[in-house]
Image: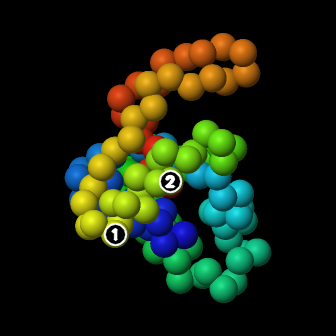
Amino acid sequence: MEGLLWAASCMRDRRITSVRFETDCSDLVEMTTNPMDWPAFTTEIEALQRLQEDFEDVSLSHIPWSQNGRADALAKEARIKCYIFSHIDQTRVDGDTPRRIGLSTLHLI
């Protein structure tokens, strides 16, 4: 959750209004879809909900760990070094069909 809040804050500060976050943490997705089931994270979930109001289009979805390794490593390194980056995946396989992903798609978590 801390990483998602950090990433959302960075995108807001950069005035990026449309973003899709992807994570290999199914619990993180669950926290955002069923916040009442996660009372220990009430403060963080409310902070995320407030941040989401600053975006025109924002989403969070689960992806397999095998598709998230590079973005995860870059995000951890960026937090340690205090700089922002964007990892833009140009191609990804959905089912059997490769497709191009637009430059507005940022994989940060």
Q: Considering only vertical position in the picture, is 88 above or below 36?
A: above
Q: Secondary structure at mark 1?
A: helix
- Residue depicted at x 69% and y 83%: 39
Instruction: Estimate the spatial distance between the alpha carbons at disc 1 and disc 2, rounded to whole Å.
Output: 13 Å
Q: Considering only vertical position in the picture, is 36 above or below 99?
A: below
Q: Residue extending furthest top?
A: 97
Give the side of residue 50 with respect to residue 81, left or right.
right
Marks 1,2: beta carbons within 8 A: no
Residue at which label 2 appears:
72
Residue at which label 1 appears:
80
**Chain-order first, disc 1 or disc 2:** 2
Residue 53 visible in the current orientation: no
Q: Secondary structure at mark 2?
A: helix
Task: Give how far across and how far down residue 95 sits, in percent.
Answer: 73, 21
> Which of 92 and 12 lies nearest the eye of the viewer?
92
Q: Residue extending furthest right?
A: 37
Kind of residue indicated by mark 2: Asp
- Residue depicted at x 52% and y 77%: 44
Task: Give how far across and how far down residue 72 sits, in percent.
Answer: 50, 53
Give the side of residue 65 with respect to residue 56, left or right.
right
